[in-house]
Image (spheres, rainbow, N blue to C red):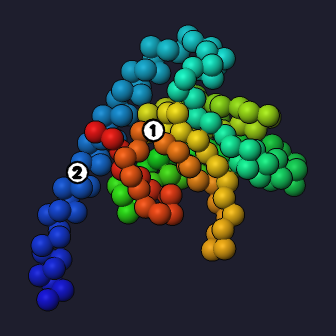
Amino acid sequence: MSRSLVKRFAPYLAGRIRENHRLLNFYSVSALKEASSSSSSSQSDTSSSLEVVHLSDNCIRRMKELQSSEPEKKLLRLGVETGGCSGFQYVFELDTKTNHDDRVFEKNGVKLVVDNVSYDFVKGATVDYVEELIRAAFVVAENPAAVGGCSCKSSFMVKQ
């Protein structure tokens, strides 16, 4: 029985993976084109636009707590990769440096870094920090590019 179930779902899963890779490739190409065309624009132009990634007060508070215990100021890095229950998943890391293709968003001395490919998936989103009984984590609370996702807010589906 389980073998027939795997045979029935394998084409579906393979199709979902192909679609996710196609979307990532499309957004990668568009992000590279946008980066090359806007390389002369200043950082203040990016943060004054309507397509910034927002930081909540809880996110800023937690990052300041983390920075106070470290000798070197950490940056919060947000990335998007294929996977998770809904097709794409958010990845948060603490980092110390930025890359040439990163977009930096700053609020109250806290910096959020998003690479150009991931940026297309999180434009206009709000990053929050939540403390629950089962976990405490950075999450993307609101994302206008997402149609839906799982209840843990770590994965999402992209609007088509």
Residue 149 horizontal side relative to residue 129, left or right: left
User: Could you say whether the residue bearing mark 2 is in a helix, strand or loop?
Assistant: helix
- Quarter of the image containing the N terminus? bottom left
Q: In this view, does 41 lie to the left or right of 25?
A: right
Q: Residues within 10 Å of mark 2 (few under 14, many from 20)?
A: few
Nearest to viewer (mark 2 / mark 1): 1
Q: Pointer 2: what residue?
A: 18
Side of 10 where 86 appears, left or right: right
Can the viewer see residue 44? yes
Residue lying furthest bottom in this view? 1
Residue identified by numbered label 1:
144
Q: Which residue is drawn at 55% across and 10% down?
A: 40
In the image, what residue occupies the spot 26% across and 55% down?
17
6 vs 120: above or below: below
Residue at x 71%, y 48% (from the top left corner):
59
> Residue 9: horizontal and vertical position, in percent?
17, 70
> 142 and 43: which one is in front?
142
Where on the picture, by quarter, is residue 105? top right
Mark 1 is surrounded, within 10 Å at the Cα level, by few (under 14), some (14 to 19) or many (20 or more) other residues, namely few
User: Is residue 85 positioned above or below 37 on the image?
Assistant: below
Q: What element carries label 1?
A: loop
Residue 7, horizontal then vertical, whole percent = 12, 75
Residue at point 43% right, 61% down? 150
Is tag 2's residue or tag 1's residue first in the polypeptide sequence? Answer: 2
Q: Which mark is residue 158?
A: none
